[in-house]
Image (cartoon, rainbow, N blue to C red):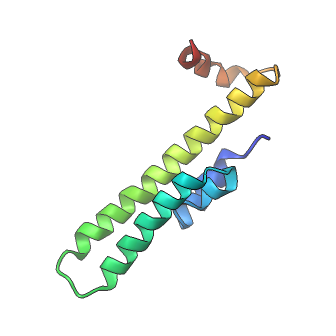
Amino acid sequence: MKKNPGVVAVLNFFIPGLGYVYVGKFSRALIHFLITVFVTVKMYLPDENTLIYLIIGFFNMAIAVYVGYDDTKQDNIIDMIKNRENIPENEKSFGKILK
């Protein structure tokens, strides 16, 4: 079933890992969610390394958004190929990866 990559990106922006739940990739969802929980807990503990945890949290969110969006687009293309549907012209560059 075709999933919307934009929805995945927005969900992962607000709660890293939630977009992966939307597309059914539960192991990735768990990894990003656990990193988010760890970073959040460490940021609120009295420690001098708060900035480091903030940076780690930002990169976790950015990776979840980008990779979630890209993976969902690729999964949709693979589903179209498996179902022998017509691939839109702007999506045909993915065919190079499949060769």
Q: Residue at x 67, y 51 (%)?
A: 24
Could you tell me how many numbered marks the image carries? 0
x then y, percent, for residue 63 = 44, 50
Residue 96: quarter of image:
top right
The quarter of the picture where the N terminus appears is top right
Q: Residue at x 44, y 54 (%)?
A: 62
Quadrant in the picture for residue 98: top right
**Residue farthest to the front, as pictured:** 27
Query: Quick one: which residue is furthest to the bottom in this view?
Result: 46
Image spot of residue 90 (x, y percent): 66, 24
| Viewer-proximal residue among 82 and 52 | 82
The residue that appears at 54% across and 19% down in the rendered structure is 97
Q: Splitting the image into 4 quarters, where does residue 73 fall? A: top right
Q: In the rendered image of this protein, does residue 7 appear above or below residue 2?
A: below
Drawn side of residue 84 relative to residue 4, left or right: right
Taking the spot 59% from the left edge, 53% from the top edge, the residue there is 9
Residue 43 sits above or below residue 20 on the image: below
